[in-house]
Amino acid sequence: MDQIKKSLIITPAKLAAFEGRKNHLDVLNSLLDEIAPIIIRDFLELPEDVETRQKHIIVAVVKHLLEFAAIRHWNLAKVYDYTYVYNGAFWQQLDNEDMKHFLGRASVKMSFPDYDVRFYEFKDKLLKQFLSDAYLPAPPKNPDKVLINLQNATMEFTPGGWISRGFDPADFLTYQLPFAYN
């Protein structure tokens, strides 16, 4: 029992193992810091005779956000019934309310009026559009491959041996162990 109690004590070494990891809110805030205004007509290549409507704004916000996040390697996705953000090493699940709030803030950063964005229905529509556009199929299970996500690499074990390799969002790993491979 004393051994278990000792293992639960938070030491400086245990805290240091988590340094450098971005949580999902840090990733979302970093995206917000870098996102820039867009011109809907140009971004969606709308013809001049088409009047810009709310549906165009919603589609443009989500499309731009997904493209921008992918460029920064902080992908956003919907897998199963949950939303996730990729922080460069692993996927973290997001609460739908956090996602709605984030989508609203991103809309304002893209130059849409705060009074429109604050309307609850607008945020609900943004979330529904995100859930539609950000679909990511779960990777197929491979019984001959085991992946272990460490601080500095992903270890891949197969019947033929093992390798240490870089992080890959396609693995859809939702954890990272708090130590590195040496």
Image (tube, grey):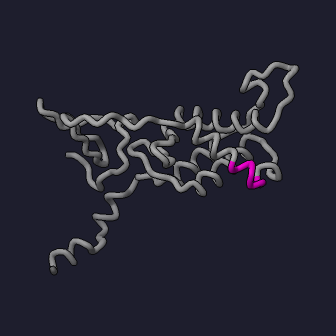
Query: In front: 96, or 101?
Result: 96
Q: Position of residue 157 (x, y in %)?
A: 18, 37
In what quadrant of the picture does the N terminus appear?
A: bottom left
The residue lying toward the viewer, choosing from 56 and 17, is 56
Of residues 137 and 70, the one drawn nearer to the viewer in this rendering: 137
Q: Number of callouts in the render?
A: 0
9 over 133 or under it: above or below: below
Q: Residue at x 59, y 51 (%)?
A: 99
- Residue located at (82% from left, 47% from top): 113
Instruction: Tell me if residue 91 is in the magenta stretch.
Output: no
Q: Which residues are magenta?
A: 118-124
x, y percent for residue 136: 47, 36
Whether the magenta-drawn stretch holds residue 123 is answered as: yes
Q: In percent of the image, x 58 and y 35: which residue is there?
A: 133
Magenta stretch, main secondary structure, is: helix
Q: In the displayed orientation, state which residue is furthest to the left.
A: 160
